[in-house]
Image (tube, rainbow, N blue to C red):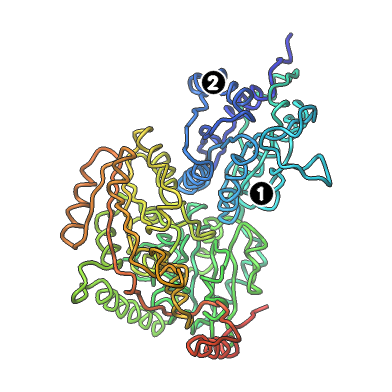
Amino acid sequence: MKTTVRLSMAAALTRFLQRQYIRRDGVEHRLIHGVWGIFGHGNVTGFGQALEEEGSFAGKNALPYLQCKNEQGMVHAAVAFAKARQRMGTYACTSSIGPGATNMITGAAVATVNRLPVLLLPGDIFSNRRPGPVLQQLEFPASQDVSVNDCFRPVSKYWDRLNRPEQILTALPEAMRVLADPAETGAVTLAMPEDVQAESADYPLHFFEKRVYTVERTPCSAENLRAACDLIRAAKRPLIVAGGGVHYSDATAALDKFCAATGIPVGVSQAGKGALIDAHPSCLGAIGVTGTAAANAIAAEADLVINIGTRLSDFTTASKTQFQNPRVRFIGINTVAFDARKHGALPLTGDARAILGQLTRALAGWRAPAAYREKVAREKQKWSSTRATLVAPKRGVPLTQAQVIDELNRACGADGTVVHASGGIPGDIHKLWRSHARNDYHSEYGYSCMGYEIAGALGIKLAEPEREVYAFLGDGSYLMLHTEIVTAVQENKKIVVVVCDNHGFGCIHGLQRGSGGNSFGNEFRHRTGADARLTGRPVDVDFAKNAESLGATGLRATTLDELRAALATAKAAKGVVVIHVPVPADIRLPGYSWWDVPVSATSKLPGVRAARARYDRTVKSKQRFYY
């Protein structure tokens, strides 16, 4: 009986990826849904040839190929797909050696920071070393076993270089294990030397049998559960901080049930938005640097903070100034022990949905104090009134970014998804967005990567084709990476791109000015004047015409009525639509918390010196360590 098959390494890789599955709650999903790629000499005759022969036309086991326009963009699309699918599946991404590979490094960091799976398959330098240095090889004189692909090591959860074709027998199962493990997942990089991809070996047939990786809903220990219940019962002002892990574990319904039973209020991180819809009595909205006045006021006095599926980044904790109660304690619910113990928390390590179920049962009959719940309701109502003033028209201003968010929120509804990542938009939309469904808000704020938005919208559309998907970004981010508009047109995937144009990197410009500095290097202006600085008139870009040149429909909206009409037109359209919305750069929403951005300790500018004095006072009076 034949027990082996002779294949090229690339063909064996392709066959293996076709038969990988992930299972949770008894439901199986494809682990690798296809391959994004741009081909070069480092992968076209190896993995590219294998995909054409083995992957694209294999019926139910097909491994579709998608052609991106930028290697970073394809990783963003894969990451967004994985997030929209709650980590139940992702894509592989392949590039040639050298610049194609290094273009993916930023995307790898996005995946790993956000705890999202993506498989990266960059071509690599020759293992046999005969033709070296090859085209696009960056030589490293201290070792001949180093290439640019070693740059992936610190941003990958698993990294390997396949120097012999039979090495995939051990490398691939381990790579899949990491991708499927909620406590380990992130970018997985398998560097593929150009010559090894084309070499053949005899592979055991059982290697290509269907493999299923089960995601278990692990409960926390009984001992720590009892300790957590004791802390909760003793608390007078408990608060939940809900992060992206609530979504990844599909625990939104469990959180709703727990909050309904206990009356504990919830503040949501960027990734946690939608973990509890805004209409829920316990939902206080965004928390932290970009948070609402309601959530931050409650957080400041909380005596117990229950962190669920959050990394507790400095934006969530307001650089460790958010929780000011001197006796505050923490409980951490997370699949990752490292995250569960942050702030000296009592760790409930395991699956968020399972642990919320444990807590709901164990706390049956207990509710937060009535007076506290009444205060939460007052803060929630007060914020609702404040929000109404923030999105109201401003005299003499045709359209503000806050108004754009409000209108987009209405247009999106429960059946759409907005995606954002960088600039001033995350700070405003986190405060103002009212989630109507768990998946109407998609934020990449772990890495806050400019250029994620359009590629990410395409990834979401691939994951949830029935939803209207809106990429919401600034002009700076659009100019950095907008080419996947062409891919969306090519794939006939409708997305709506809303570009807020404030002629520059407005968020950092505001931070610069707010720290007492002059305007320098953040506005898109012509170089002019005797000192040849960038202080001339703004550089005008017609984003609607640019979109049309890429195959999309371009619209422009300068007033509220025009924006409403443009959003209605976009919703009725069949293809990709880009809406160009000019907004003023100097109208910003107030903040309700602090962010640690050190100001220069010496400066000629009075404004900088004053900002430094404020900075020193805040660090001394508010910044805390809880360990």
Position of 179 with respect to 56 (left or right) is: right
Give the quarter of the image for residue 341: bottom right
On the image, which quarter does residue 290 sit in? bottom left
As drawn, the residue found furthest toward the right would be 142
Q: Residues within 10 Å of mark 1 (few under 14, many from 20)?
A: many
Q: CA distance from mark 1 to mark 2?
A: 28 Å
Crowd class of label 2 (few under 14; some 14 to 19; many from 20; radius 10 Å):
some
Image quadrant in which the C terminus is located: bottom right
Vertical placement of residue 607 versus 229, above or below: below
Image coordinates of residue 562 in percent, x first then y, are 17, 57
**Could you tell me which residue is drawn at 69 percent across and 53 percent down?**
154
Residue 304: give x, y in percent of width and height: 54, 78
Q: Position of residue 88 (x, y in %)?
A: 52, 42
134 to the left or right of 277: right
Give the residue number, with chain letter if any, for mark 2. 52
Residue 87's tag is none
In the rendered image, the quadrant that contains the N terminus is top right
Residue with the mark numbered 1: 156
The answer to whether residue 431 is above or below residue 54 is: below
Image point (45%, 79%), residue name: 518
SS class of the residue under badge 1?
loop
Residue in front for this viewpoint, 364 or 591: 591
The amino acid marked with disc number 2 is Glu
In the foreground, 335 or 507 = 507
